[in-house]
Amino acid sequence: MSLQCPRCHSSKVASFHHAMKIGAAIGTVGGAARGVSAALAGGQAGALIGAFAGPVGITLGSVSGAIFGGLAGGVGGCALGAQLGESLDRHVLAHNLCLLCGHHFNLPA
Ligand SMILES: [Zn+2]
């Protein structure tokens, strides 16, 4: 993707992605929180499945269910937050700077 300054049509444009990072951070935290509840649910589901295989199965099922749930929640939240931050970054905050004329601009929504 190449940016172009709307004022002087130069392609020497610096683009900052603060919002994307903030969004990703928020998403990671939210995703981790969601992942904890997913981990609990995953652990329970894993324990249920593992119950068929006996005591060892319960432990293995709980642990793997919790790890999988937590990971899925964290990764999903991070991706979601990054997407949110990126659209904020592109359409709301003036984070593109033309290096030729110094014009700050957003991409059209
Ligand atoms: Zn310019």
Image (cartoon, helix red, strand yellow):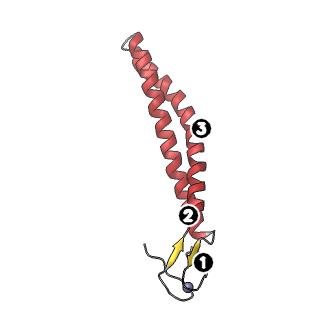
Quadrant observed for ligand 1 in the rendered image: bottom right
Of callouts 2 and 1, the N-terminal one: 2
Q: Quadrant of the N terminus?
A: bottom left
Of callouts 3 and 2, the N-terminal one: 2
Q: Is residue 52 above or below residue 6?
A: above
Of callouts 1 and 3, the N-terminal one: 3
Residue lying farthest top? 55
Q: Mark on residue 33?
A: 3
Horizontal relation, residue 94 to residue 67: left or right: right
Q: List x then y, in percent, for residue 48.
A: 45, 19
Type of amino acid at the residue the image marks with label 3: Ala
Tell me the residue at 59%/38% (across/down). 33
Q: Residues within 10 Å of mark 1 (few under 14, many from 20)?
A: many
Tell me the residue at 42%/26% (across/down). 64
Estimate the spatial distance between the alpha carbons at disc 3 and disc 2, rounded to whole Å. Answer: 24 Å
Q: Which residue is mark 2?
A: 17
Q: Is residue 44 above or below residue 108?
A: above
Type of amino acid at the residue the image marks with label 1: Phe
Q: SS for tag 3?
A: helix
Q: Mark on residue 35?
A: none
Estimate the spatial distance between the alpha carbons at disc 1 and disc 3, rounded to whole Å. Answer: 35 Å
Residue lying farthest left? 53
Tell me the residue at 53%/73% (across/down). 14
Q: List x then y, in percent, for residue 70.
A: 50, 34
Type of amino acid at the residue the image marks with label 2: His
Q: List x then y, in percent, for residue 77.
A: 53, 46
Q: Mark on residue 105?
A: 1
